[in-house]
Amino acid sequence: MPELPEVEQAASTLRRWLEGAPIARARAAPTRLFRAGGRLLFQRLLPGSRLEGVDRRGKILLLSFAGASGKVGLLCHLGMTGKWVHRPSSADPPAHAHVRLELEGGAVVHYTDPRLFGRIEVHRDADLLALPAVLALGPDPLLDGIDPEVLHARLAKTRRPVKAALLDQALLAGVGNIYATEALFHAGIHPGRAASGLSRAEVARIAVGIDAAMAAALARPVEEIAYLSEGGHVGNPFLVYDRAGERCPRCKRGTIEALTIGGRTSAFCGRCQRAG
DNA sequence: ACGGATGTTCGCGC
DNA sequence: CGCGCGAACATCCG
C-alpha cells in the first residue's frame, strides 16, 4: 500500500480513527519493524496519550501523540505491504498484525505487514521533521508541488534512465514504481530514456503526468486506492501499470510492453513512448 | 511450482 | 569519493 497517494490516504484514515481517542494500551511484537530499537518505548510511552496529528512527507507517516509525560513522535514507513487497519477489540486480529494501539472505548488499530519491509521509529515529537530520513527527501509533489525547472536541472545530473531516477526519493518524495510508470505514459516518454537527455518540455510533461496520476488516485474512494491489497475484487485503475500485453488505452494500436529498468518492471506503450 | 510484487538499504565494482 | 547496479530483506499470489 505504499506510494504517495496511498500513504496520504493512510494518514487521513489514521486521523479519523485515532484523533481524540486516548490510547489505553500499546503492544508490539519483537519484529524487525523497530530497527532502531524503540519497541519498548512504544509500549511504555503511548498509553495515556492521544493523537494530536498525522503528517506525511513523501511515503513517510509522522504521528504526533501528547500525553502526561510530554509529546511522542512516531515515524512509520509502510514499506511494500504495510497497512494500518481498524478493528473492534472483540474481533480476531488481522493476519500479520505485529503492532497495535488499543483505544479507550474498545477499538484497536493494528499495523499489519506480511513482508516486514516497513519501519516504525519512536522519537521526540519535536524532532520528527528534522530526522535525517525526512531531511533527505526531495520536494513532495502534493505539499510542495513540482518545479519543472528544478526537476530538469536535477535529472540533467544523473546518468540513469529516467524511470530509475524518478524512484529516487531525494529527487521527488513519494513517487514509486506505479506512479513513475503512469507519469511516463502520460508524458509519452520511454522509461529507458537517459534522464540527462530530456528536454525542458519533456520534463514539464513528466511533472504534469505525476500530478495527474496522483490526483486521479486521490480522487478514488479510499478502499480502491491500493487495489493490489484488496484481494483483487477491485479492478486495476491504472492506465499501463500491470497491463503488459494489453492494448494501449491512448492510441488503441500499440501494445503495452514490459521492461526491467533499475531492477523494477516498467510498463509502457511501444508506440506512444519511443526509445529515442 | 516458479516468479514476481507498491520499497529501502547494503556491499561491490568502476 | 560518488555513482550505479544487483542482492537481500519475508511472504503471498497467480
Image: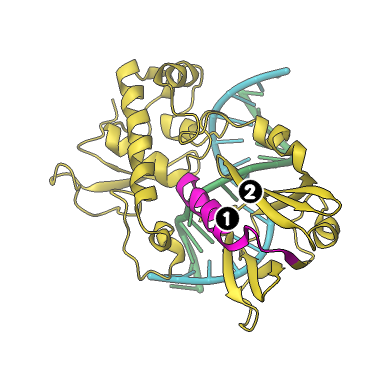
Chain colours: A yellow, B green, C cyan
First in sequence: mark 1 vs mark 2: 1
Decide: is A14 above or below A270: below
For the residue pair A217 and A103, the one nearer the viewer reads as A103
The mark found on residue A53 in the picture is 2
Q: Nearer the viewer, residue A205 or A181?
A: A205
Compared across the picture, whether A91 is left or right of A232 comes to right
Q: Could you say which disc has been placed on residue A15 in the image? A: 1
Q: Quadrant of residue A55?
A: top right
Q: Amino acid at mark 2?
A: Gly
Label 1, residues with CA under 10 Å away: few <14, some 14-19, many ≥20: some
Indicate the chain on which mark 2 is placed: A
> Residue placed at 51% from the left, 31% from the top?
A172
Q: Give left or right: position of A37 versus A183.
A: right
Q: Main secondary structure of the magenta part?
A: helix
Q: Is residue A52 visible?
A: yes
| Magenta residue span | A2-23
Element type at mark 1:
helix
**Left or right of A9 on screen, residue A249:** left
